[in-house]
Image (cartoon, grey):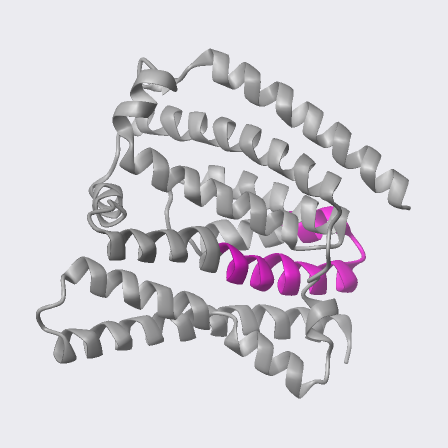
């Protein structure tokens, strides 16, 4: 099979995965409303989101199994060292702060649309069960499945087909940003996708991406549910406090320095 066919198949599998997840989520949502009419609509939406997110990767797994391809190798499910893990934590924390400041700038320029306000309300933790669903879906399941789909599957196929790492990362990141269907976050998600793609390629593992992705989503949940704390210690005139931005730049630099040194020692 030629390289162009590989790319078309990979893109088709990713699109199929997304459509399949949407249909499953919508169907599960409708079933829950019929079977459990007294269940809170927010919890129904969260349960549907969790189920659809889990099943996003199913078409990829079926495709790889049918073609007798090693799932672990193809999806880059490889271990990382403790030093790499620590360096990724530093880079992630710093990058999350920078991305949050970009969010603040976008909202200052254009305001927050109604659909974002609805999303914010949906991710408010109102009970133990509700909190478990939100944290499980956003910080564990979504990062794991999306990194397998985009950085583990799609990006690797593009890398092998084009033999151009930069192009593969940029195209995968663009696709990743577009499928989130949120014009207010497209730049931030694209930049996040670029870093996720670089880390997956550089370490030959999706684990760094899962860590960054999970921490980023977890920070968003925390920010959404502890506004008073963040307003007191983190924000400054509706922007991120400059001290935190300086801190973020420093730890990003230190994190990459540690990462490069560790990877050089491993080679």
The residue at 89%/39% (across/down) is: 265
The residue at 31%/24% (across/down) is: 229
x and y percent of residue 49 in the render? 33, 63
Q: Main secondary structure of the magenta part?
A: helix
Q: Is residue 165 above or below residue 65?
A: above
Q: Is residue 41 above or below residue 227?
A: below
| 65 relative to 51 in the view: left or right | right
Q: Which residues are magenta?
A: 143-170
Instruction: Report the number of discs.
Output: 0
| 163 relative to 190 in the view: left or right | right
Residue 151 falls within the magenta-colored stretch: yes
Q: Is residue 167 above or below residue 23?
A: above
Which of the pair 37/190 is nearer the observer? 37
Camera sees residue 108:
no
The residue at 88%/45% (across/down) is: 266
x and y percent of residue 167 in the render? 70, 49
Most distant residue in the front direction? 128
| 131 relative to 156 in the view: left or right | left
Camera sees residue 39:
yes
x and y percent of residue 257 in the render? 76, 28
Most distant residue in the left direction? 38
x and y percent of residue 165 in the render? 76, 50
Q: Is residue 84 above or below residue 162?
A: above
């Amino acid at each position: 099979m030629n390289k162009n066919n590989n790319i078309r198949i990979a893109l088709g599998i990713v699109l199929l995965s997304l459509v399949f997840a949407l249909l499953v989520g919508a169907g599960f949502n409708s079933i829950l409303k019929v079977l459990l009419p007294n269940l809170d609509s927010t919890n129904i939406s969260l349960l549907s989101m969790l189920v659809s997110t889990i099943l996003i990767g199913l078409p990829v797994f079926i495709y790889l199994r049918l073609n007798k391809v090693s799932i672990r190798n193809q999806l880059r499910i490889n271990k990382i060292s403790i030093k790499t893990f620590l360096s990724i934590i530093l880079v992630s924390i710093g990058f999350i702060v920078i991305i949050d400041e970009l969010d603040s700038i976008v909202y200052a320029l254009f305001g927050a649309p109604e659909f974002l306000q609805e999303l914010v309300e949906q991710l408010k933790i109102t009970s133990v069960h509700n909190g478990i669903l939100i944290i499980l879906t956003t910080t564990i399941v979504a990062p794991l499945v999306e990194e397998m789909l985009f950085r583990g599957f799609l990006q690797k196929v593009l890398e092998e087909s084009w033999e151009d790492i930069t192009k593969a990362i940029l195209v995968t990141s663009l696709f990743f940003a577009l499928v989130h269907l949120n014009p207010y976050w497209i730049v931030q998600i694209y930049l996040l996708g670029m870093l996720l793609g670089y880390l997956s390629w550089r370490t030959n593992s999706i684990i760094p991406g899962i860590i960054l992705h999970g921490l980023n989503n977890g920070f968003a949940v925390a920010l959404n549910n502890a506004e008073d704390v963040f307003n007191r210690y983190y924000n400054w005139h509706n922007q991120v406090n400059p001290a935190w931005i300086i801190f973020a730049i420093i730890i990003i630099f230190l994190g990459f320095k540690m990462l490069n040194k560790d990877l050089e020692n491993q080679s």
